Structure formats: C-alpha cells, structure tokens
Amino acid sequence: MTKRHYKVSLYDALEGNRLALGTDPQILNRNDLLSALGRPYHGYHLEIYEKATALIHAIISNHPFVDGNKRTALYLTELLLQRSGYELDVVDLELFSKFVLVAKGEMDYDGLREWLKTVINPLA
C-alpha cells in the first residue's frame, strides 16, 4: 500500500525560487508553474520516486521561473521527500548534475525515474 505523500504547494515553489535567487521569485509563466506542481499528484504517480521524477521533470521542462528552475526543483524535491518521510542517498551536487542532464535533454524521464528509484530511501 502506498503511503500518503506531501503535496508541494505554490508557496513552497515561490520560497524555493526565492532561496535559489536570493531575491523575490520571478515567475515567467504562472500556468506552467501550476501545471508542474500538479503533475506529481495525478493518479498514476503512486510511488514517491515517481512523484519526485514528475516534479523534477515538470519544473525543468516547463521552465516556469525566469531563472533558478533547476535549483528550485532541487529544493522542492528535497522538501517533498523529507516531508513524506524519505531522503536521497546522494549529495546535492550529484542530484543537480542529473538535473542539468535533464535540462540538456541528455537524460529522459524514464532514465531519471530509474535513477531516483535507486537513491530514495525511507528516513531512518
């Protein structure tokens, strides 16, 4: 049985972008942001690694902020996992390097999902 996972909010995304930029968040497209935030919570993303994949891929692909999209995705991913009772068994730099690959089109959705499946673990 799949446990209930934290739902990342618009406030979380704005806070993540504020932290990424060190200034007020700069939304490029509000609808793209809302779409990206909603994507992990569609019925077919049941496992936490699937939700994380959907969130990362949507934020990076939709590019809803003027700048700091990958850093915001990193913040939101860590927030989603931590508040859902999980952690990443990688350092931020390794995770961020995967985000860069996704942004460049060198890692697809399935590749990201399979990698995340191996590095997300329940909190001890």
Image (cartoon, grey):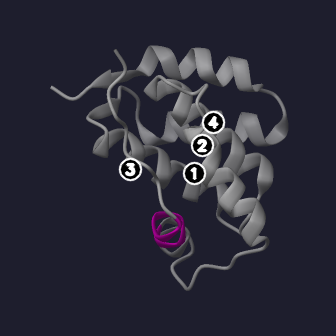
Report which residue position mark 1 lands on: 73
- Distance from disc 4 to disc 2, alpha carbons, whole Å, reads 4 Å
Q: Which of marks 4 and 1 is in front?
A: 4
| Whether residue 107 is situated above or below residue 60 in the rendered picture | above
The N terminus: image quadrant: top left
Q: Which mark is residue 54?
A: 4
Point out residue 27 in the picture as x, y percentages from the top left corner. 70, 75
Residue under pointer 3? 79
Tell me which numbered mark, 3 or 2, is placed earlier along the sequence: 2
Q: What residue type is labelled 3?
A: Leu
Q: Is mark 2 on a helix, strand or loop?
A: helix
Q: Earlier in the sequence, mark 4 or mark 3?
A: 4
**Disc 4, disc 3: CB below 8 Å?**
no
- Choose between 87 and 8: the one closer to the eye: 8
Q: Name the residue under label 2.
A: 55
Amino acid under label 1? Ala
What residue sits 50% from the left and 24% below the top?
A: 46
Classed neighbour count for the residue bearing mark 4: other residues with Cα under 10 Å, few (<14), some (14–19), many (≥20): many
Give the magenta range. Answer: 10-15
Q: Do the residues labelled 2 and 1 touch (CB within 8 Å)?
A: yes
